Each structure stands twice: as C-alpha cells, then as structure tokens.
Amino acid sequence: MQDLRGEPEELFRQTASGIQPKMRFALEVLLPRQGVDDFGAKFETPAQRIRYEIHIEMRDPSLGIFVTHEDCRIIKGEDDKIIFSPPLKLSRSSRKRPFLETELNSNGTPRVFIIRQDGLAESGISKRGTPLQLPATEASRSALSTIATSEFRHLYALKRLVTGAQFLEINPAAARKANDRFEDKKLRGDASNLAASLSEIQRKSATHVRPNGALADISADLAMLISEVTNVRVLDNEKSKEYAFDVELRDGTSFSSRVISDGTIRLLALLTVIDDPNREGILCFEEPENGVHEGRIPDLIDILRSATDTQDRDGDFFQVLINTHSPAVMRSLRPEEVLFADMVRTMPVGSDIPETKTRMRRIAPDKTLFDDEHHLYPAKVEEILKQKSSGI
C-alpha cells in the first residue's frame, strides 16, 4: 500500500455511509514446476495449482492496517475452474492440510497464523516439523511475507509470484536520463533506470553470434511499432561512467534519449520488460495504446500476447494485465482475454441510500450468448467505448 497512490485509508471503499474498513482478496495461481530460492537451493512444486486468501482491516487510521486472515491450500482437480491450458500436464498433489491457515480465538478473532513446512529433507522425504505459529492479533504484515526459503516451497514460490508483479507508470522525463553504472538494473516502475536496464539486458544476453543479444529483439519490435526506427543503441561513456541510449532512424540519423518523443520512450520501456529473457511474474501497464499509431496496435497486442505464451526453463509463465479505453485495442483482443468494468448504482438491502459499485463482465463471442448483467458482446463494448470517448 505504501507504493500506491494516496494514503492507505484512501484505498478502502468509500460509500455514502462512510469508509468500508475491510478488504478481502483471493488468488488462484499456477506455480512454476521448479525454482531456486535466494540461497541457491533448488525445489519443485508438486502442487502447481493453489489458492491464497488474505483479509485486511483498517481498525483506525491512527492505528494502521492489520491482516486478519490468511489461508493457502491446494486446488483439487475436480474443483479447478482454470481456463488457461498449459502445454504440459499440471502437477497436482493429494495434500489435505493447508500450507497456511488462521486459527481463531473463541470469540472469532484471529489468534495465530499456522505455517507448515513442505520442503524436502536430504533424504528426499517431505519435512513434517512442528508448524510455525505467528501471532495474528495485531499483525501489521502478512505471514506470507515472512517466507524466506524453500523450506516452505509452495509458499516461497507463491511469494515470488506475488512480489514479482511490476507496475509500469512511465515518467518519460526520468526515463531519458543517463544512469550511473551502479544503478539498479531491473527496470523501475517509472523507468528512471531505463538506460541501465537496457545495458544489463544486452550484457547478459550477448553471444558471439548476437553481440547485441536481446537488445536486437527490442530494436526489431520497436521498429515494427514505429516504422522510422531501425535500431536502439546503448551508449557506455567510459569518462563519465554512465549509461545512455539513442535511437537510429532509417535515413541514418540518430537521436539521443533527450529528444525522442514521449510515445517512443513509453514503448521502449514496455519492450524492455517484454523482451527481457529473464522476465517473470506479472506486468501491469496502463493504456498501451498511448503513443502508438492505431494501425500498429494489433502488432503491439501480438507482442504482448506472445510474451505470455511461452514457458521459461522453470515452467513458469509471464502474465500481462493492461487496462484500456481504446476501441482499437478492444478489436485486437480475444473475447476470453477481456473483463469489462463499468460503474452501476445499486440500492443496498435495508437502506434508502444508493451506492455506486464496479461491475465486472466477461465478453461473449457473439450477441446470442450474452446476458446484460454478466456478459457483453464485442460490438456492444465498442459502442459503449465510442459513446464515452465522444463526450470527452
């Protein structure tokens, strides 16, 4: 919450009757088949499909926000409603006990979080030590956040997945600047270390055959989206000990990062994440159409989609979440890839004060299969988007 817009209490739902002090979240995830923890220990995940739940509560803005419930357990095959179909058969487990659960006091308040080992001993047998118990009465952080090793292998893989989410809110002015050689190499959300990230991708992926490594892929994709561009170059200034970059055009001219357009900077930062051979986790990106010619939007969506189609060497997938108000983007998406969000006014039971809520609807392939409350069809979505945009 500290990294999001506004104060923590402002993120809770605000209604005519006041702020609702509770939030509940549930994640159903597909874990990678294997991984390596921060200490170099390799591990496998016999149960790739697990469900994680967490509840948080604001008791008083002056006191802070507390975790009141956590639970993590396997999703049985007969209960699994996964839509995505990975190319390899999922690894499942018959485990009955949760990896993580909350034990309550007699009055229903949380007492302790119970965390159970599931790593392997040297003999190869799963560990069955005494469960770890953490006080839950005034927990200001999640139990999941305490997991540090593959001794709790499923929870460790889950934590890696959750903390791997990357939010790109690109600041073009910051992204244009040269970076010190000791700058962080993983791209920040504002892309202020873009030059350092490009340099690191080139260094790690370079071979004798491809001296530019994955930087060549970034250049090719940028050229597909912006026809005048031919190449992106990393500039290593030995004297100032800084990294910078420029962009070459088809007529042979080149422009430094200081003068290229905001749209080009946005696309370059996006491709730096997408074409990174070591990409992982989840990328969240607002309005990908900004700075892209409408005729190139299908190519951009294809680039984003292809990044999510391939497993890495650990059997993990990369996921992209975007939001858009663009009919052109909508036309490039498949119905199963879309959730349509709009605001509706409802009358709560026992109250005469209407509330505004966000409604989420799937997209039916055609008009004959939809119902207005739960589904829309593609033409209706485009009609709504055009109506909204015409009033701006």
Image (spheres, grey):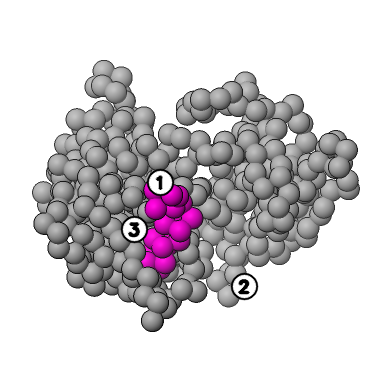
Residue 192 is tagged as none
Q: Nearer the viewer, residue 183 or 371?
A: 183
In the rendered structure, the answer to whether residue 274 lies left or right of residue 119 reads left
Furthest residue to the top?
368
Q: Helix, strand, or loop for circle 1?
A: loop
x, y percent for residue 106: 80, 50
Question: Which residue corresponds to mark 3?
Answer: 269
Q: Quadrant of residue 298?
A: top left
In the rendered structure, the answer to whether residue 382 lies left or right of residue 364 reads left
Task: Answer with mark 2 or mark 3, whichever residue precedes in sequence.
Answer: 2
- Residue 91 against residue 368 in the figure, above or below: below
Q: What's the distance in space between the residues labelled 1 and 2, CA to CA?
A: 59 Å
Residue drawn at x 71%, y 45% as measured from the top left? 42
Residue 209 is tagged as 1
Indicate the amino acid at tag 1: Val
Q: Are marks 2 and 3 in contact (CB under 8 Å)?
A: no
Queried whether the magenta region covers residue 33, the answer comes back as no
In the rendered structure, the answer to whether residue 356 lies left or right of residue 124 reads left
Queried whether the magenta region covers residue 202, the answer comes back as yes
x, y percent for residue 214: 39, 50
Question: Which residue corresponds to mark 2?
Answer: 63
Say if residue 11 shows up in the picture: no
Mark 3, mark 1: which one is toward the viewer?
A: 1
Q: What's the distance in space between the residues labelled 3 and 1, CA to CA?
A: 25 Å
Task: Answer with mark 1 or mark 2, whichever residue precedes in sequence.
Answer: 2
Q: Nearer the viewer, residue 290 or 39?
A: 39
Indicate the amino acid at tag 2: Leu
**For the magenta stretch, what is the residue range?**
193-211
